[in-house]
Structure formats: C-alpha cells, structure tokens
Image (cartoon, grey):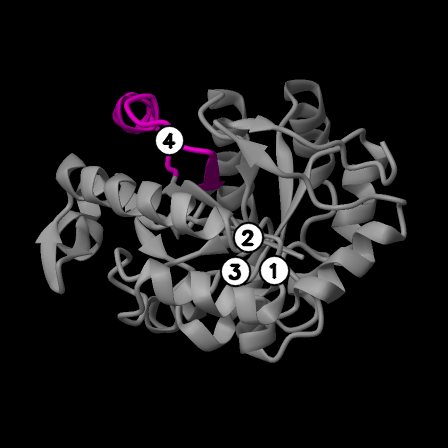
C-alpha cells in the first residue's frame, strides 16, 4: 500500500489539508509509504494562472522559498512518523512543456527530492487537466490533434532526463472522454508504444494514477492495456498514486492498482533520493 502522488496544502488547487493530516490519515488506512508531490508549473504563458503555491495559509507567487519550508516541515514529519511505521517521502510533480527544460532542471537539481513526477497537463498552454479549461478548448478541436500534441510533448519530456516517473499517462482521457467518447480510450494506439520503449531504455517508471475514480471512469490513468504494453516493452518501475487533492481521496484505488501489478507478479516501487529502492518483481 504505497500512495506516491499526494497534493498537500502547498498545491493551490488542493484543499487546505496539511502534510501531517495526510500522515495521520495514512496511518489509519494502513499505508506503508506516502510521497508528497506538490505542483510546480513552469510555463511563463500561464504565470498568472499557475505560478502560485500556498504557504502559511496564504497564496504566494511561486519561488524556491516555499520549497525550503516544504522540506523543513517534511523532515520533521519523516523523523516523527518513521517511529509510527509509515515512511514519508518528499517529491514533486512537474508540469512539463517543451522549452522549459532549463528552468525545470534548476529546481529539481537544487533540492533532495525522493521522486520527481513528470506530467503533461497542458496543450497549447491550456490545461486539459482542468474541467473548466477543457470545456472551452476541447469542443473546438479533434481527438487526433489533441492526442498528437500530447504525445509529441510527452516524448520530449521522456527524452529530457529530468523525471523519474511519468504521471497519469493518457491524461487527455480525463475530460476528453466526455467530448470524444470511447475513441479517447483507444487513441494511444500507435503513439504510446515507442514512448514506452524509450522509457524502458532510460529506466523511467510509469505511474498508475487512480484519480479516474473521481471522474467516474472505470480505467485508471493509464489504462490497463497501456500498463500491459509497458510491461511488454520492458518497463519494470511502477508507482501507484491517488493524486489526492483532499484528505478523503488519500489511498483511493491504490489496492486495485496494486492488483493490476500483481497480474505481472509485480509490486509498486519505492523511491529514496530519486533512486528506486525496491525491485518491482515480487519476492526479489
């Protein structure tokens, strides 16, 4: 029971629950490890939308100062809760887009993160992860265009070498299914296979993100078929994450995500200082 995608109150789109509240809830749920992954967005076009964090109950313009406080608080919780039987990891979810590599590297190399998730949240500087922005953007597009742009961006993110794990691959399905129907579930075909091969060669991991539960979708991100393809292409690092933005979402779907991995005699990978510390093959 590892939940490696959690947004505490440092993320402005999360409810105002502290890291310690998540630690306590994790203990109640019997989670073995949790990894905090607050957002860090880098697109200057979206500065007035995304470049913010919550610090001390106030929304502040994003900068490295909030990360200093994040690590200070996180180190205290690591020490406190290690005695309680739950491991606390300190990660980051980076919103990737082409051309932002230098800015991203400056941040991810400056702090001792346990895990850096790479995510594609935007197409044409529009957040397809957002219900509101998707409702304004997707009706004026076609699925092939959306998917082509998504995977062209993702492949550059994989090649950048900046990330440890790719988060919620096929995220376009979150709101795209509403506009494109069942085709959104099959749209990965022909795009994702070479990306998975590149991930395997580079030793990148794949996240099984269970936040689709909140959308009423019966397939996680990515779908079970993509997880199967990832295994066939040689990926052996997998993480599971609820993408919790509120306390009640912690751990949701994690057991079912682990069941998917068990079909491959695999279990979720732990990370420490950006290095996998467990082998996904059960019993090894």
Secondary element at tag 3: loop
* Residue 146 can be seen in this image: yes
The magenta span reads 96-118
The residue pinned by badge 2 equals 86
Judging depth in this view, the residue of 41 and 11 nearest the camera is 11
Secondary element at tag 4: loop
Q: Are marks 2 and 4 in contact (CB under 8 Å)?
A: no
The residue pinned by badge 3 equals 142
Q: Residues within 10 Å of mark 4 (few under 14, many from 20)?
A: some
Q: For the point 56% across and 50% down, which residue is it?
A: 147
Q: Are marks 1 and 2 in contact (CB under 8 Å)?
A: yes
Total count of labels: 4
Q: Are marks 2 and 3 in contact (CB under 8 Å)?
A: no
The residue pinned by badge 4 equals 98
Q: Residues within 10 Å of mark 2 (few under 14, many from 20)?
A: many
Outermost residue on the bottom side: it is 216
Return the x and y of residue 91 as percentages of the image width and height.
42, 41
Q: Residues within 10 Å of mark 3 (few under 14, many from 20)?
A: few
* Vertical placement of residue 218 versus 280, above or below: below
Secondary element at tag 2: loop
């Amino acid at each position: 029971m590892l939940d490696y995608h959690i947004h505490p109150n440092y993320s402005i789109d999360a409810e105002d629950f502290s890291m310690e509240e998540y630690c306590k809830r994790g203990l109640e749920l019997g989670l073995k490890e949790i990894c905090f992954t607050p957002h860090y967005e880098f697109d200057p076009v979206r500065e007035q939308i995304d470049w913010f964090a919550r610090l001390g109950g106030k929304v502040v313009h994003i900068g490295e100062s909030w990360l200093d406080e994040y690590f200070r608080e996180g180190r205290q919780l690591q020490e406190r809760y290690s005695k309680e039987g739950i491991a606390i990891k300190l990660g980051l979810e980076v919103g990737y887009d082409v051309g932002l590599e230098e800015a991203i590297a400056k941040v991810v190399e400056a702090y001792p993160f346990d895990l850096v998730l790479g995510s594609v949240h935007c197409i044409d500087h529009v957040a397809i992860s957002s219900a509101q922005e998707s409702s304004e953007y997707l009706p004026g597009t076609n699925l092939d265009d959306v998917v082509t742009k998504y995977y062209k961006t993702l492949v550059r993110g994989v090649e950048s070498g900046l990330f440890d794990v790719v988060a919620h691959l096929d995220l376009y399905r979150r709101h795209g299914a509403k506009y494109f129907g069942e085709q959104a579930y099959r749209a990965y075909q022909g795009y994702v296979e070479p990306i998975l091969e590149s991930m395997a060669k580079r030793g990148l991991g794949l996240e099984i993100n269970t936040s689709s539960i909140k959308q009423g979708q019966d397939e996680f991100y990515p779908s079970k078929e993509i997880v199967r393809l990832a295994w066939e292409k040689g990926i052996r690092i997998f993480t599971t994450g609820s993408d919790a933005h509120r306390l009640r979402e912690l751990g949701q779907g994690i057991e079912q995500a682990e069941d998917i991995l068990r079909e491959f005699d695999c279990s979720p990978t732990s990370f420490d200082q950006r290095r996998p510390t467990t082998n996904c093959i059960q019993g090894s």
